[in-house]
Every structure is written in C-alpha cells, then in structure tokens.
Image (spheres, helix red, strand yellow):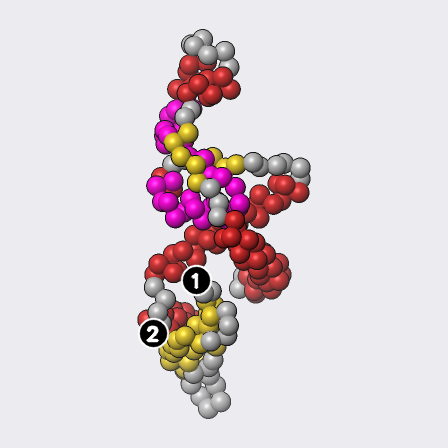
Amino acid sequence: MPRYVLGIDAGTESIRTRIFDDTGKCHSFGVSENQNIHKQPGWGEQNIDQWDESLIKSIRNAFEGSDITPAHIYRGIMEGVVYGTQIILERMEEGGVHIDEIIACGGATESDLWMQIHADVTGKNIVIPAEQQAVSLGSAIAGMVGAGIFPDLATAADAVVKVGRIVTPDPGNTEKYREYVRQYEATYENLKEESRRLVKSLD
C-alpha cells in the first residue's frame, strides 16, 4: 500500500492542501479561502477560529477528491500507535530487558488486523489468552492461592491461564516496518524542539 503525506500551504488568502504519495506524485488538491479583515489601508487581520476551520476544510476537500478512504486513515492511526510501542520495546532492549513475546488481552484482541499489525511491526508473536477477562481471572488466581488451592501465583497461572491463539509476524512486513518506525522516530526527534518553541509561543 502506498504511503501518503499531506503538504499544507497556509497562505494569507487561502489554505491549500495537497496529498502526495512517496514517489512525489500529487493525488489530490483541496483549498479553502481565508477571511481577511482590513480595518484600515495596509492593515490585515485574521480570526484564528476561522483560520482553523479553513485548515480543516482544506484538508477535507483534499481527501474528498482522492482515492484515500477512511480505512486508510484509520490504518495509519493504528500503525502509528504500534510504532510508539516498538520504540518503547527498543528502549527496553537497550536497557537489558529482552522481550520474547507479547501477551495481549481485552477488547482490542477482537481485531485480527490490530493484532497482526502489532506482530508485524514488533516482529514478535502476539499471544492471546482464551479468557479475555484478565482482571477478573487474575483476581480469581490470587484467591486460589489465598485459599491454598495453589502454592503460589506462578503455579496457579500456569494451571489456569490457557492460550487461545498466537498471531505470528510476517517477516516481509516486519522488514518494511523497520524503515517506517525509523522515519516515525526521526520525525519526532527533528521536530520536538520546534514543537516546544511553538507551544511556548502560544502561552
């Protein structure tokens, strides 16, 4: 699937948005006019609320004129979240904590796509327990130990917790994602100081 990037030109008279793929080809164009206030000759003002609305409208117009669907955007959000997870795992590895597999539970595991993205980005098996109510099961396990049914938590967990399924990574996808994660991290590193300056300027 091609990767898309928004290019936004916020001008005085209008805001123009173009959607490019990773070859530089423009797929769509959207524009929204700004409302300029001229209280006297040579004087120009803009309403920030209207400017924000114009920005959103420009982006929306660009998407409506393209073949990019909400599913593309949603998948991009899902991948971005997992890129953050992968960076955390890398930092843990650098600190000497090795992760062999990831155990996932809860409602998110109902999405096969979501779990497969986790497996592909991290390159690790995603182990999904048969019982999804992990908190309730964990409480019951603690109760079993307290009642003397099992001698300790590890023994109780080994006896009670069952694996429902395992999602394995696709090595080809994992290799592609390595570069995407690198770019994701580089974007943050390159923009973090400018972002901080921007936030301070808005105080």
In the picture provided, is 28 more to the left or to the right than 121? left
Which residue is located at x 46 percent, y 21 percent? 157
Where is the N terminus found, in terms of image quarters? Answer: bottom left
* 116 part of magenta stretch: yes
Separation of marks 2 and 1 at Cα, in angstroms: 19 Å
Dividing the picture into quadrants, the one containing residue 34 is bottom left
With respect to residue 120, does 184 lie above or below? below
Front one among 38 and 170: 170
Res 15 visible: no
With respect to residue 97, does 187 lie above or below? below
Front one among 155 and 123: 123
* Circle number at residue 1: 1
* Circle number at residue 65: 2
Q: Which residues are magenta?
A: 109-138
With respect to residue 34, does 172 lie above or below? above
Which residue is located at x 57 percent, y 43 percent? 89
Q: Tell me the crowding category of disc 2: few under 14, some 14 to 19, or many 20 or more residues within 10 angstroms, Cα based.
A: few
